[in-house]
Amino acid sequence: MKKTLSVILALVMSFLMIPVSVLAADVGSVPSEYTPSPSALPVSTVDEFEAMGNGNEYYLTNNIDFGGKKYTTYIAEKADFRLDGCGFSIKNFSFEGTLIAMYKEPLSGTSVKNLVIGSVDSPINVSGNSNLGCMYTQIVQPTVVENVKIFTNISTTGNAGAIAPYVSISAECVIKNCEVNGSVTGKDAGGLFGHIKRATKAFVLDGCTNNAGVTGAEAGGIVGYLRTPLNITNCVNNGTIVTNGNYAGGILGGFGFTSDLSLNFIGCSNYGSVVGNKTGKIGSDYSKDINIDGGVGGILGASNTFVYEYSTKINIDKCMNYGTITTNGLSAGAIMGKGVAAKDGYASHIIIKNCGNIGTVNYGDIVTPVGSLVSAVSTEQTSSIIISNCFNAGLSNSPKALAGVYNLNGEPSKSDASVSDLYYLLGNFTEVANTLNVKVRNSVACTDEQFASGEVAFSLGNAFGQKLKVDSYPVANGPVVVQVDGEYVNINTISAGADGSAMPYIQETEAVAGKQSVRFVIAVDSDNIDSAATVEMTIVFKKTGEQDILYTLENGNVKLFKSVVADSVVYMGDNGVVLLGAAVDGVVASEWDSTSIVLTVKDESGAAISELCVSATYIK
């Protein structure tokens, strides 16, 4: 019963918690009931597609096959329209030439959404010289690209990116929920963008995925090279990233600021291999035997040397690396390849927190020391590298592999390099860090068994979760792990009562303006409710040392599920189990730290037939 029951609980909670708008199965698709704007003009043929412009709004009525048409110039030089693809595709065309893509650039206000460009069997081939893209050759005015899937093969000696090889914009630009497949090869090469020269805080780059193989001197799964402040959030790379130059990263290849700027990576993950083929400059001195000119990393590759003359801040939070990182002399790290130094009068700050690594960090032909989370340049200058609340379960073939940071010798009085609360795999790393310059606090070598048990996920707090007996290591946004009677368990596996008649699954949302919603599902033997006229659920929110707060939910607010239908499959509980679901909205987040539940089943007269009490089922 328990296995089937856990499936049902997960399904019911997903229906209780997930907004309908995000249930679309695939990037580029739309829900079956989706309708375009009533003011949009229909487009159903190649001729109509080529004629779009004049600031009008359009929508596709069907898939459009271009019949193998080869363009030697743009479909139109200026993209001046708003297009809703309505989940349809355009395919079977290609480009060959100089400075070419579907459009040279979008004009202000242009948007493309809900569209598939190309297909698995017929990707859009783009080849030639100079900067090449699939959608645009440059973005210099405000535009929106949202829920767009691209299949493309781009090959050039210039910059390359599926959405655009070049971006320089000082106004709002939104790139959201996009996906790239195929291959991208160029100088500054990225799955979405090759080179971003200028952007603002209004530049949104969120929820995008790269599945394409990317090769370049500066190569990144999302962006190849960056010279501007930027926030990159919730992006994923699955493609193989290769540099024959100095920089490669699963999310960003390299960057080089020309002023005091900041760079933020939040909630990003890399699953692809990241490879640095260039032989580094290796010295005989242990303190100077990594290449300070470049680097390869799961999230971020490296900084250009001219960053040295500016103050920079890099924040990497809630990011994960699962891919293999391979270096042949370049600095290497699972999260960041090479850090940032700053000369006197300036300062650089690298903050890596709530991050994890499961991937391997290896050297190639040259025995290279690696900081398995980050390799850092010299701290002789005013700079800081702070690593906190992270785990490293990855492996390395380097005899000089350090679990946290490999830091070149310098003058500690000018720098602040530290590693704290790092949990790493026992036996694979000789040290957490080069302790000559790096302060180490509460760094713990852990066995595979400790990782699998949930102990590490519990120790890391809310930053990670773990589905016990399924996940071998902590995972971002995984099920919460709590400790009960000395054992680590998920909250949805805690049963109450000797007969196991009530098994709660409880989930809380993030607080907004101090308030949150708490959702409940309880599995109950149907014998307890078959003869019931009403079902009442009393939720008690408890806070240590303070008065309990009670919410009573009566029949209309308690949902009964005898079965759940998902993907055309009917899931039913074994042995007469049914599910009761309920939600309490507007709970003041600061007023509780645990809950208990009393489920009362009443007959037609209002008399209680039975009570099921579940005590302290969830602890925040």
Image (cartoon, grey):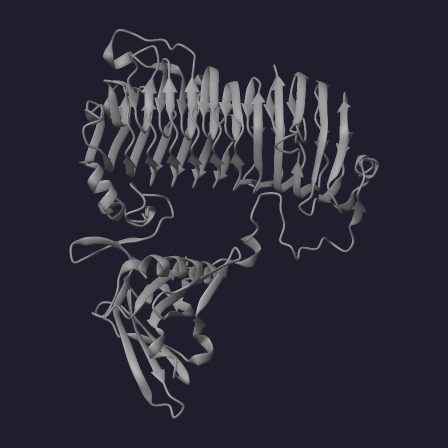
- In depth, the one of 568 and 311 nearer the eye is 568
449 horizontally vs 31: left or right:
left
Image quadrant in which you'd find residue 593: bottom left
The N terminus: image quadrant = bottom left
| Residue at left offset 32%, top offset 85% | 609
- In depth, the one of 603 and 237 nearer the eye is 603
Please provide percent x and percent y for residue 517: 42, 64
Where 535 falls versus 199 (above or below)?
A: below
Please provide percent x and percent y for residue 394: 29, 30
- In depth, the one of 183 and 368 nearer the eye is 183
Please provide percent x and percent y for residue 255: 48, 24
Where 422 falls versus 214 (above or below)?
A: below
Please provide percent x and percent y for residue 305: 43, 17
Which residue is the extreme one toward the top?
284
| Residue at left offset 30%, top offset 7% | 283
- In depth, the one of 78 and 396 nearer the eye is 396
Which residue is the extreme one toward the bottom?
605
Image quadrant in which you'd find residue 329: top left
152 horizontally vs 212: left or right:
right
The C terminus: image quadrant = bottom left
Q: Can residue 488 be spotted in the picture?
A: yes
| Residue at left offset 40%, top offset 62% | 514
Image quadrant in which you'd find residue 153: top right
How many marks overall? 0
Which residue is the extreme one toward the front?
575
Q: Can residue 382 be spotted in the picture?
A: no
Which residue is the extreme one toward the left?
486
| Residue at left offset 45%, top offset 20% | 247
